[in-house]
Amino acid sequence: MAQYNIAVIVGSIRKDSFNKKLANALEKLFPADFSFTHVRLDDLPPYNQDDDAHQAASVLRLKGEIKAAQGLMFVTPEYNRSIPGVLKNAIDHASRPYGQSAWDGKAAGVIGTSVGPIGTALSQQHLRNILAYLNAPTLGQPEAFIHNKEGLYNADGSIGEASRKFLQGWVDAYVAWVKAHA
Ligand code: FNR
């Protein structure tokens, strides 16, 4: 029986997203008492402060899923050395109205994969800055900058041998982080 629900926030809405694939593979490394809710970002309107008093149904759904979760797992690409706009849009939506942020106090883990060798390092650094402001305690170590290259996955989509120990270590640290903050 799942005790801890993790809101999985993938910063790419691309159908064949490498980050979505990474999120799915990581989930298999968690213990049985963890379950996952993939939050949707693709139907959120562009954030507009004028709408704070009457947020769209998709925004209320997002906030409800974040509030109901014991942890947040951000799996995001790097776009132009920062986070994708769709992710920032979602973060802004769920942070408002002022004083009613859904992010407050939620244990976060940040990871991502990119086709470039720096493996989303700068995107993650920008995301950490935002999460610090939003008071979402974020796992510091290990950092995980994943270069999307040959051999990262097995044919069934699970993490391949070369990266398995490292990524299991990341998941184990994140699991302990979520439990410590639940
Ligand atoms: C990229 N990409 C990229 N990669 C990187 O390592 N650093 C970067 O700054 C950028 N910038 C960037 C901007 C834009 C607009 C796009 C579309 C792409 C490449 C990126 O890593 C690649 O497209 C990944 O496949 C995106 O992740 P998903 O969609 O596969 O999860």
Image: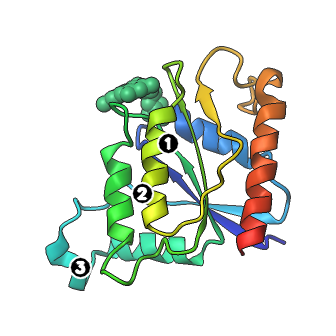
The nearer-to-camera label among 3 and 1 is: 1
The kind of secondary structure element at disc 2 is helix
Q: How would you rate the neighbour count of disc 1 (Cα within 10 Å): few for under 14, some for 14-19, many for 20 or more?
A: many
Amino acid type assigned to the residue bearing label 3 in the image? Asp
- The vertical placement of 134 against 122, above or below, is below
Callout 3–callout 1 Cβ contact below 8 Å? no
Is residue 56 rendered to the left or right of residue 61? Answer: left
Mark 2 residue CB less than 8 A from any atom of ligand 1: no
Q: Residue 79: x percent and y percent? A: 36, 33
Specify the quadrant that holds the N terminus: bottom right
Q: Quadrant of residue 178?
A: bottom right
Q: Residue 7: x percent and y percent? A: 58, 62
- For this rendering, which residue is in front, 124 or 163? 124
- For this rendering, which residue is in front, 125 or 54? 125
- The vertical placement of 154 against 24, above or below, is above
Quadrant location of ligand 1?
A: top left
Give the residue at mark 3.
52
Give the residue at mark 1.
124
Q: Quadrant of residue 122?
A: top left
Amino acid type assigned to the residue bearing label 1 in the image? Gln
Q: Quadrant of residue 161?
A: top right
| Alpha carbons under labels 3 and 2: distance apart | 20 Å
Is residue 95 rendered to the left or right of residue 65? Answer: left
Residue 130 badge: 2
Residue appearing at x 39%, y 70% in the figure: 94
Is residue 146 rendered to the left or right of residue 135? Answer: right
| Alpha carbons under labels 2 and 1: distance apart | 10 Å
The kind of secondary structure element at disc 1 is helix
Mark 3 or mark 1: whose residue is earlier in sequence: 3
Mark 3 or mark 2: whose residue is earlier in sequence: 3
